[in-house]
Amino acid sequence: MSISTLEVFGKRFRELVDAKGISKTQCAKEIGISYKTFDDMSTYGKGKRIRILLRLVKYFNVSSDYLLGLSYDKTIKGTK
């Protein structure tokens, strides 16, 4: 059984927060989402709003493909 994209997203989201050395509450506040939304995203991979995804991509400076489990490469390609 394969891991779903949303499960990979939640796992990688938690890894990025841990690597940044900040609390879940602090991260939620800094990216402008509620703690509930943050918790849903990191625990269940919920919260599919593109605006939130874009905030995360910018905040962690990683590609959305990496967050979504579509790539192992964190690099953002073709940025302006």
Image (cartoon, helix red, strand yellow):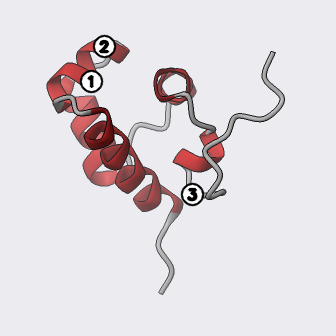
In-image side of 7 versus 35 (left or right): right
Name the residue tied to disc 1: 27
Q: Position of residue 63 (x, y in %)?
A: 63, 38
Residue 26 lies in what quarter of the image? top left
Give the residue type at disc 3.
Gly
Crowdedness near tag 1: few (<14), some (14–19) or many (≥20) residues, C-alpha within 10 Å: some
The reply, left or right, for residue 27 in relation to residue 55 is: left
Disc 3 or 2, which lies upstream in sequence? 2
In the structure shown, which secondary structural element does the residue marked by tag 1 occupy?
helix
Q: Which residue is nearer to you in this view: 13 or 39?
A: 13
Q: Earlier in the sequence, mark 3 or mark 1?
A: 1
Check disc 2 and give the amino acid type: Glu
Q: Kindly identify which residue carries mark 2.
A: 30
In the image, residue 11 above or below residue 50: below
Outermost residue toward the bottom in this view: 1
The amino acid marked with disc number 1 is Cys
Image quadrant assignment for residue 79: top right
In the rendered structure, find residue 69 and report the number of the disc placed on it.
Answer: 3
Which of the pair 21/38 is nearer the observer?
21
Residue 35, labelled with which disc? none
Q: Position of residue 80 (x, y in %)?
A: 81, 15
Q: Using the image, determine if residue 11 lies above or below residue 3.
A: above
Asked whether the residues under the numbered discs 2 and 1 touch, taking CB atoms below 8 Å apart as contact, a structural biologist would say yes
